[in-house]
């Protein structure tokens, strides 16, 4: 099977979220003997990123376009050319691994879409939100006329996307995301050294992955933390990931009880998960919620929101609370940190839950989806 994957290379280096999904799916599909994987990408991104990503990305056959990604995307949407086969005539499946579009002639087109957040009232009403909604509507108008299958990552996302764009409902296929193998690795000397250099060894801390952003419910987290800190004075909040400047300033005003690590590589993130008393994920909206499973794979109890896709992904292996309620979040974190038996119960359930989500299985399901089109 000849698969031409359109990948935004800039998003798979030091990646989280959608970038991680694209990277893991393509890497695991490429491991199959019955897949001949080629990559369609921006020449500039290739020059900048491919050598940094390493692994199979340094060896894939590439087909590159010279235009900037945004300009090339506009040409594909409005001019309908060049078709994918102009880059690789043998392509049988063209897969856009994120919300994007490549026209095709005889090949079958698969597009990955993660959620309908911009149409579910998640973001504040402002020009930036309106602009993104308009961009998405133009894109989905084109996709709805040409895409053979839409791959999405949860039943929740499938339902919300079908509500926003009824014309694609029959072509939606759910294939869950998974946990990268690194998060199942045991705590080791490298993890211990990272915690020590971060001044976290032998300290009790709660990990907030994903950074401080509006969608990740940063406002609630920053309101809840001083209350929680008063109840458990020796507790530290560790925030991993990039942060919006406004929330970054607010977090710094809370003093040394909040540690901002910025982006960390997977091995370092694993150390933070494993060293934490609990992982806190109060997100307002998730199409999937990979940090929930990563935490569980590391054997760390999770307190997360009871909304969107999170209950579907966590099952009964996490403490779920209302993301609008500061008091519920504080009480849940306090209970998990203070109750060893509860932590052990969540640890056991979480490990078992995470083991059922593998990228090998997700890639196999995606391959079956490809096969059904041929």
Image: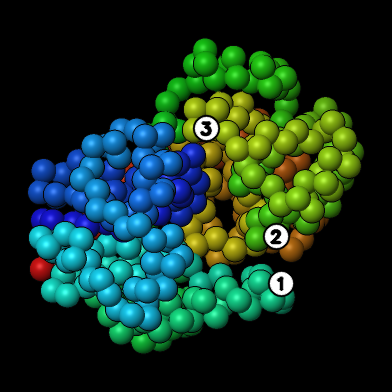
Q: Nearer the viewer, residue 326 or 27?
A: 27
User: Residue 288: x and y, percent?
Assistant: 48, 58
The 10 Å Cα crowd at callout 1, few under 14, some 14 to 19, many 20 or more, is few
Is 157 on the left or on the right of 176, as rendered? right
The residue drawn where x is 71% and y is 31% is 205
- SS of the residue at dot 1? loop
State whether residue 158 is above or below residue 61: below
The residue drawn where x is 34% and y is 73% is 76
Q: Earlier in the sequence, mark 3 or mark 2?
A: 2
Q: Earlier in the sequence, mark 2 or mark 1?
A: 1
Measure how far apart labels 2 and 1 are at the Cα level: 9 Å
User: Residue 87: x and y, percent?
Assistant: 20, 61
Report the quarter where the N terminus lies: bottom left
State whether residue 280 is above or below residue 260: below
Q: Which residue is mark 3?
A: 265
Q: Which residue is mark 1?
A: 124
**Circles 2 and 1: CB distance less than 8 Å?**
yes
Q: Which residue is mark 2?
A: 214
Measure how far apart labels 3 and 1 are at the Cα level: 31 Å
Measure how far apart labels 3 and 2 are at the Cα level: 23 Å
The residue drawn where x is 24% and y is 48% is 62
């Amino acid at each position: 099977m000849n698969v031409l994957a359109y990948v935004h290379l800039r998003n798979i280096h030091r990646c989280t979220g959608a970038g991680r999904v694209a990277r893991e799916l393509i890497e695991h599909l490429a491991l199959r003997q019955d897949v001949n994987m080629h990559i369609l990408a921006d020449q500039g991104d290739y020059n900048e990123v491919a050598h940094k990503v390493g692994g199979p990305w340094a060896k894939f056959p590439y087909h590159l376009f010279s235009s900037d990604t945004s300009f090339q995307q506009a040409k594909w949407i409005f001019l309908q050319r060049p078709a994918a086969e102009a880059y690789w005539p043998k392509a049988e499946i063209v897969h856009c691994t994120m919300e994007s579009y490549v026209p095709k002639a005889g090949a079958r087109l698969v597009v990955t879409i993660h959620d309908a957040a911009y149409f579910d009232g998640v973001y504040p009403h402002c020009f930036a939100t309106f602009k993104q909604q308009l961009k998405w509507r133009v894109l989905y108008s084109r996709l709805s006329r040409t895409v053979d299958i839409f791959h999405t990552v949860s039943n929740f996302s499938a339902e919300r996307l079908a509500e926003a764009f009824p014309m694609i409902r029959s072509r939606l296929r759910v294939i869950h995301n998974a946990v990268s193998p690194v998060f199942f690795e045991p705590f080791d000397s490298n993890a211990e050294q990272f915690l020590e250099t971060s001044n976290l060894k032998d300290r009790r801390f709660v990990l907030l992955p994903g950074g401080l952003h509006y969608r990740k419910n940063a406002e609630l987290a920053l309101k809840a933390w001083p209350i929680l800190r008063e109840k458990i004075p020796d507790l530290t909040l560790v925030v991993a990931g990039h942060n919006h400047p406004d929330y970054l300033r607010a977090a710094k005003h809370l003093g040394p009880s909040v540690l901002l690590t910025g982006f960390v590589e997977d091995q370092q993130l694993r150390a933070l998960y494993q060293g934490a008393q609990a992982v806190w994920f109060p997100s307002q909206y998730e199409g999937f919620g990979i940090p929930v499973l990563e935490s569980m794979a590391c054997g760390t109890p999770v307190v997360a929101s009871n909304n969107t896709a999170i209950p579907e992904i966590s099952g009964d292996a996490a403490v779920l609370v209302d993301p609008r309620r500061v008091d519920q979040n504080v009480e849940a974190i306090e209970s998990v940190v203070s109750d060893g038996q509860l932590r052990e119960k969540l640890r056991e359930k979480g490990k078992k839950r995470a083991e059922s989500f593998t990228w090998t299985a997700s890639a196999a399901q995606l391959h079956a989806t490809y096969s059904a089109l041929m």
